Structure formats: structure tokens, C-alpha cells
Amino acid sequence: MRELNGSELAGFIKERQAKQVRALRQAWHINPRLAIVTDVENPVIETYMRLKQRYGADILIDVEIHRVPAGGALEVIQELNNRDDVQGIILQLPISNSDQTEELLESIREDKDVDGLRKKAIFQAATPTAINWLLAGYGVDLKGKKVAIVGRGRLVGAPLEKMWLKSGVDVTVFEKGDDLSQLINYDIIVSATGVPGLIKSQMIKTKAVVIDAGTASENGKIVGDVSEEVRQRNDVIITPKKGGVGPLTVSALFDNVITACLKIANQSKN
């Protein structure tokens, strides 16, 4: 089995980002700041937010976490929209009332939507960007390949499908209730459903590339969509249990924060 190690690639990206942030601070006196808004208490979400704080500290980007009561996110987002010292805002999903997701995401100012989840987003969505970086970093070419996405969620499946279709990739999207035995016909499979163990060995052909972008909590641990039997095979290329898409998703998010700051610097210069 060959692993697609996102942590390794993220290390190189982090070095480049640290240099960019130093330049922003020294040459332009811009202190990059990311604000995270959450209205739920969930150990998995807490883990993700801590990872972002730690990554930000490593490259000198300040990360604020705003924990608000259920239904209180809109007011905080509006306040953050008006703060000149905040260049990036993300709504940590899921939220307490999923019916409000669309409204809240659209309320984030376009130039601060560093998760790229608004309908008309300036920035590329972080996880799809991470998946593209991972494939490119390991020389996996999508051209001429049959590509499948399992799950059409807001964070991964939907924006990734849009991104790949725009690039001319031959991509098919499967939902959780579809006949997933058909995955055996695909060369590259990205799964992002949050259903532990959904992707079984009999669904995966020899030499397939499998990207596990699913996240769920099981017995207090974060687990993916791909079953352990797939990981036991030595004839597939796959992301590891830890250190696959996740680290690069964080890198992509902070890349967007840096880009937002660079746009401000260019506006000041002009």
C-alpha cells in the first residue's frame, strides 16, 4: 500500500506561508487574523479548532475562537465583518441549526470568506483545494481517469465536483444511498460522507487511488469513511488514517487568509 501523506506536503507549504506572513508584518504592518465562529459544543470540532490555532501560531497568524450560544452567530459575524483587524472569518460547521447554514455563510463578507463556501466565493474551498494539492504532490493525474466522489456535502463533495467539472475532469458523484458497488469501475475515489466504514474492499479495484475525506466521531475518536479492510490491502494508493487530507485543508485555509492580506497590501500600495 502506498500512502498519500498530506502532513509531509503541509510542512513544505507551512514554511512558505511563514515567510509570507513575516513579510506582511514587516513590510506592510499587516497582522493576519482569522476568526472562527461556532455555536456547538463538540469534541471533534474542538479538536479541529485547536489544530487551526496551533497552525496559525506556527506561522504567526492570530486565530480567535468565538463560542456563541445557539442562534447567536449572525450578530458576531456582522461584528467581525466590520473589524479591520480581521481578514478572514469561518463558520465552523456543523452548527446547532442546520437550516441557518446558508444564511450564515452568505452573511460573511465576500472578501473575508476564507473557507470559500459562499455561493459566489472569491476563494477556493479549502478541502477540495487540499485534495488537488495532495494528488498533484504525489503525481496523480486526473486526465483520462474515471473519477468518483462519494457524498455531495457542502464542505467537500459539492465544491470539489464543481471544481473538477470546470477543469474538464470526468467525475461522477454518488450519494450514500446509491449502489456503491459501482465504485469498482473507478480509478480515483474521494469519499466525504461522514459514515464510518462505508467504503468496503470489494468496492475498490486494484491500483485505485482512494482519498478518505470523511470525518465522524466514533467512541471519542475521529474516523473516516474507508473501512479497515481497504487499508490492509497492498494494491491500492490511499490516504492514511491521520495526516491525509486534514493537514492540507488547514494549509489551504491559511493560504486563503494570506491571500486576503496580500490583497489588502496591494490596495494600500495602489
Image: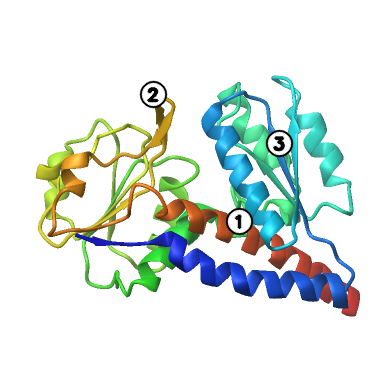
- Pointer 3 local density, CA inside 10 Å: few below 14, some 14–19, many at least 20: many
Q: Residue at label 2?
A: 219
Q: Residue at x 12, y 60 (%)?
A: 235
N-term-proximal mark, 3 vs 1: 3
- The residue carrying mark 1 is 253
What's the CA distance linking mark 2 and mark 3?
26 Å
The crowd level at tag 2 (other Cα within 10 Å; few <14, some 14-19, many 20+) is few
Foreground pick, 121 / 115: 115
Residue appearing at x 21%, y 61% in the figure: 146
Residue 266 x %, y %: 82, 76
Label placed on residue 58: none
Question: Image check: 43 left or right of 172?
Answer: right
Vertical side of 90 occupied by 266: above or below:
below
Q: Position of residue 200 (x, y in %)?
A: 17, 40
Mark 2 or mark 1, which is nearer the start of the sequence? 2
Which of the 4 quarters of the picture holds residue 220? top left
Q: Which residue is mark 3?
A: 37
Q: Residue at x 63, y 24 (%)?
A: 40
Rendered-image quadrant of the C terminus: bottom right
Query: What type is the residue that disc 1 sits on?
Result: Leu
**Mark closer to the chain start, 2 or 3:** 3
